[in-house]
Image (cartoon, coloured by chain):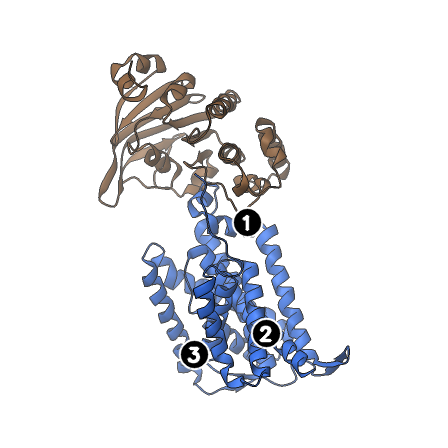
Chain colours: A brown, B blue
Amino acid sequence: MLRVEEINVYYGNIQALKDVSLEINQGEIVTLIGANGAGKSTLLKTISGLLKPKQGQVIYEGRNIAGKAAQAIVKMGISHVPEGRRVFANMTVEENLDLGAYLRKDKAGIREDAEKVYGLFPRLLERRKQHSGTLSGGEQQMLAMGRALMARPRLLVLDEPSMGLAPLLVKTIFRIIEEINAAGTTILLVEQNAHMALSIASRAYVLETGRVVLSGTPDELNASEKVKMAYLGGH
Amino acid sequence: MELVQQLVNGISLGSIYALIALGYTMVYGIVKLINFAHGDVFMVGSFMGFYSITILDLSFFPALVLTMAACALFGVAIERIAYKPLRNATRIAALITAIGVSLLIEYGVIYFRGAQPEAYPGDVLPKETISLFGLSVSSQSIFILGVSVALMILLQFIVHKTKIGKAMRAVSHDADAARLMGINVNNTISATFAIGSALAGAAGVIFGTYYIKIEPLMGIIPGLKAFVAAVLGGIGIIPGAMVGGLLLGVIEALVSALGYSLWRDGAAFVVLILILIFLPSGLFGKNVREKV
């Protein structure tokens, strides 16, 4: 479905990604783990069009989307839930969801999808008319995910959905990610919480200072000494 | 009675400041640029209104609509040509460019039509004195206030109820997040310049019909005062610009009414200094806090 081929991405003179390649197949949950500053968010931003790679290609459903405008990429079916949620704090929950469906014109479909989002996150329904700046961190995460789903993505890109959330809430969020995946949306997940990420992923990539250093199934990665030491807290 | 009459004058003048201040504040809200050429869009608007009325022989409302449309295009052209290439440049570079654009428009107009002033025909709007609760108020004051308020209500409707309005609010809050929604940020910024410039154009026509005399450098002082009004209300906040504009007009009128009419231009800048010292985020401004 998506194939990243040897991309190099720079911030000014600093190279953030070096010859990174990765592949996501239809229906998978692929996770990307790595330390802070390894380039995970940079990779996601390159896929969703916020950054342009200097070299390399991003092939999505047979077309090279590298360097295309973000709005074109959303239209093609890739939605990105950014790190730190980035909800529109000055607007209500409802308005945030409306903006998620910005490119769509099928009013009935939009209403239907809003119902689905409220079904997935009943808390959002309770807070529909509330300004999203007043929501808790977990609720904002739900809103950010719901907002991305409103575009009816085929590939949902999630950046650190568990960041700063209480353990119980992290579990809820991961359960919902699995539900979204089961309903037919392919998922690319970036997580610091490698344990949780590997527990739901079909395949995983390990990123270290801008390079892919390991990849495989969760079982293979769990068995790797290196991953254990670096990301799963030793033992 | 004298005082109340001055208040009515102040509100009329203030509604003109408010219309100009809206453009300042909207543009600042979305691209964090103080568009110092905005007062000159107001000037261009008053000339367009003048030519629509005298040469095209239009009455007030068609002239107003035509001017607003033309100023919208003018504003978009300024943004695309002068500011867009500097989107990622330092703020000071953009600010200096804005001052350059301002001078270019002022002296461009002088180059093409000369520096001599022009007078709006006196019969654009009916001039009557209406008695209201024992006060005599000119029908023009009320008319101006009515048109300004109608435009502000229309703006609120656009910003809160339409798709482009929601996009504008989203971009001003977080441009990258807006991109991820599929919002075309460049078009949204252009739309903001279009709407702000249309309002400045409307203010120009209203100014001309009310104060009669227009000239190519007329945009400087009202532009600066509208900037003060925007800061007074809290720059980037739309209702703040409306209230700030009206308040500034009333303050000026009161300063005149107290017999210090020579000081009225100074009053605006005293207000600016006080606001910057005591309430830097303005009347409607909030201290922005981020949730981690």
| Disc on res. B250 | 2
* Residue A190 in view here: yes
**Residue flagged by tag 3: what amino acid is it?**
Val
Q: Position of residue B122 (x, y in %)?
A: 63, 86
User: Helix, strand, or loop for circle 3?
Assistant: helix
Question: Does residue B27 lie above or below A31 as drawn?
Answer: below
Indicate the secondary structure of the residue bearing disc 1: helix
Residues tagged 2 and 1 counted as in contact (Cβ below 8 A): no
Comparing A225 with B69, the one in front is A225
Which class describes the residues within 10 Å of circle 3: few (<14), some (14-19), or many (20+)? some
Q: Quadrant of the N terminus of chain B?
A: bottom right
Q: What x and y, as percent, mark residue B214?
A: 52, 82
Q: Which residue is mark 3?
A: B109
State the SS at label 2: helix
Please tell me if label 3 and label 2 are on a single chain.
yes
Whether residue B169 sits left or right of residue A116 in the image: it is left
Label disc, if present, on residue B166 of the rendered structure: 1
CB contact under 8 Å: marks 3 and 2? no
